[in-house]
Image (cartoon, rainbow, N blue to C red):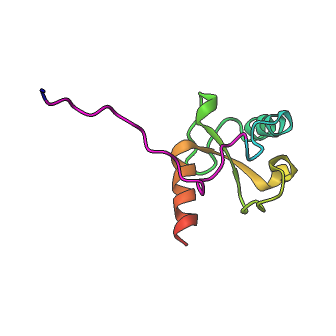
Amino acid sequence: MPWRQPAFRPRKRPADVRPSSHARGYGSPAWQRVRLQVIARDGGCCRACGLVIHRPRDAHIDHIERKPVNEAAENTPISGLQLLCSRCHGEKTRREQES
């Protein structure tokens, strides 16, 4: 029988992986209203690098102070949120996890 390349089978996610954004409360209509308010307040510009964000998926709303685990996302006051581009948000998250 000829050799056949094995089929790709994605790895199963372990149970301790962080839940999806919707499961963590970021899909609710209340959070979407808060998100739009922060984008409007910051003028669509990343607070860290000043990049003008054109695509909504590249607009990341970041909690300046770490959000308590059981607190609803929309309960954070708008002054405690900032608009970051995806690159700056990734860098900030990496720095926080390292410390």
The residue located at (81%, 40%) in the rendering is 31
The residue located at (68%, 43%) in the rendering is 21
Asked whether residue 6 is drawn in magenta, I would say yes
Q: Residue furthest left?
A: 2
The residue located at (55%, 65%) in the rendering is 97
Closer-to-camera residue (99/49): 99
Tell me if residue 82 comes above or below residue 96 in the rendering.
above
Closer-to-camera residue (55/32): 32
Residue 65's image quarter?
bottom right
Tell me if residue 37 comes above or below residue 1 in the rendering.
below
The residue located at (71%, 58%) in the rendering is 64
- Give coordinates of residue 76: x percent, y percent: 84, 53
Query: Which secondary structure class fits the magenta region best?
Result: loop
Could you tell me which quadrant the C terminus lies in? bottom right
- How many numbered circles are shown? 0
* Extent of the magenta region: 3-22
Tell me if residue 5 comes above or below residue 81 in the rendering.
above
Could you tell me which quadrant the N terminus lies in? top left
- Give coordinates of residue 60: x percent, y percent: 64, 42
- Give coordinates of residue 14: x percent, y percent: 54, 53
Residue 16's image quarter?
bottom right
Asked whether residue 23 is drawn in magenta, I would say no
- Judged left or right of residue 68, residue 47 is left
Q: Residue furthest bottom?
A: 99
Closer-to-camera residue (90/15): 15
- Give coordinates of residue 88: x percent, y percent: 54, 50
- Judged left or right of residue 9, residue 40 is right
